[in-house]
Amino acid sequence: MLVLSIITVVFNDRLGFVKTANSVFEQRQFYPGIEYIVIDGGSTDGTVEAIEQLSDGIDYWVSERDSGIYDAMNKGWRAANGNALLFLNAGDYFVGDVLSSLQVAPAFLPVKYVDIFGRFRNRPVVNQRSGISNCHQGIVFEAKSIAYDCTYDICADYKYFLEHGYSNKISMLPSKGHVFFDAVGVSATRVRERDRQIFDIRCQYFGTLVASVYELKPWLKRVVRSILGKIK
């Protein structure tokens, strides 16, 4: 059995952390080979107290200031002892039996989220040229000495995925459950900057021509969001 290190990064999100942590504890009944690591950014809202209360189910935790989410995620994988990694941050959580069939890494997990129209949706697997093929909450990574590039403060997960040599061809784990992805985050509010970072990463890995072709879809999405914003 793979030892799966699940890493939760949190900062001033007590309720989100508790929901995430409890879902990890429940997942152990389906997959006992879980190491749970929590990296807190020096929270002051009661999150640290919640971590202490739940510490019996946590293998390693620390609360200290960091330089942002990807710096914290780097701290997480460096503390991990497992041979596979899953980054499940505060507010994201397991629903049902997600991991019982896990045997190898890498693997994709089914992910659901609430879209901008309030609809409960399956997160589709996409071509790696358009962006990260599955959100990082739905990717079981191999434990390699690869760090998140913190110069991309929104989209380092995309570059991290590509640096592993991964693509949309990774097998989807046959799961009865799913991961719920909390889509209300920095990348959802800094849309233009997110798309610029994705474009830059695309250029590095696939060239300017391919990057420009795949830029059309996010441009159209920005136009639609702008129109919807004016209507509201």
Image: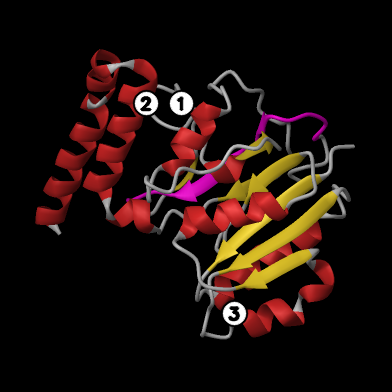
Query: What type is the residue that disc 3 sits on?
Result: Thr
Tell me which segment is drawn in magenta: 102-117
Name the magenta segment's main secondary structure. loop
Residue 49 % position (x, y): 66, 85
> Which disc, if any, is residue 126?
1
Amino acid at dot 2? Ser
Instruction: Please report contact status of discs 1 and 2: CB closer than 8 Å, yes or no.
Output: yes
Is residue 95 visible in this depiction of the protein?
no
Disc 2 from disc 3: Cα separation: 36 Å
Mark pair 1, 2: CA separation: 7 Å
- Residues at marks 1 and 3 touching, judged by CB atoms closer than 8 Å: no
Answer left or right for 171 relative to 65: right
Left or right position of 62 against 160: right
* Residue 137: image location, x then y, percent: 58, 46
Residue at image position (30%, 39%) is 197
Any mark on residue 141, and which?
A: none
For the residue pair 232 and 169, the one nearer the viewer reads as 169
Give the image location of residue 217, x and y in percent: 25, 28
Callout 2: SS: loop
Q: Nearer the viewer, mark 1 or mark 2?
A: 2
**178 up-or-down from 64: above or below:** above
**Which label was assigned to residue 130?**
2
Residue at image point 90% right, 37% down: 1
Could you give the CA–CA distance between mark 1 and mark 3, rounded to whole angstroms? 35 Å
Judge whether residue 26 can be spotted in this image: yes
Left/right placement of residue 98 relative to residue 57 reads left
Task: Decide: is 170 above or below 101.
Answer: above
Mark carried by residue 47:
3
Q: Amino acid at mark 1?
A: Val
Estimate the x, y position of residue 187 in percent, counting from the top left: 35, 51
* Position of 44 relative to 35 (above/below): below
Q: Is residue 138 magenta?
A: no
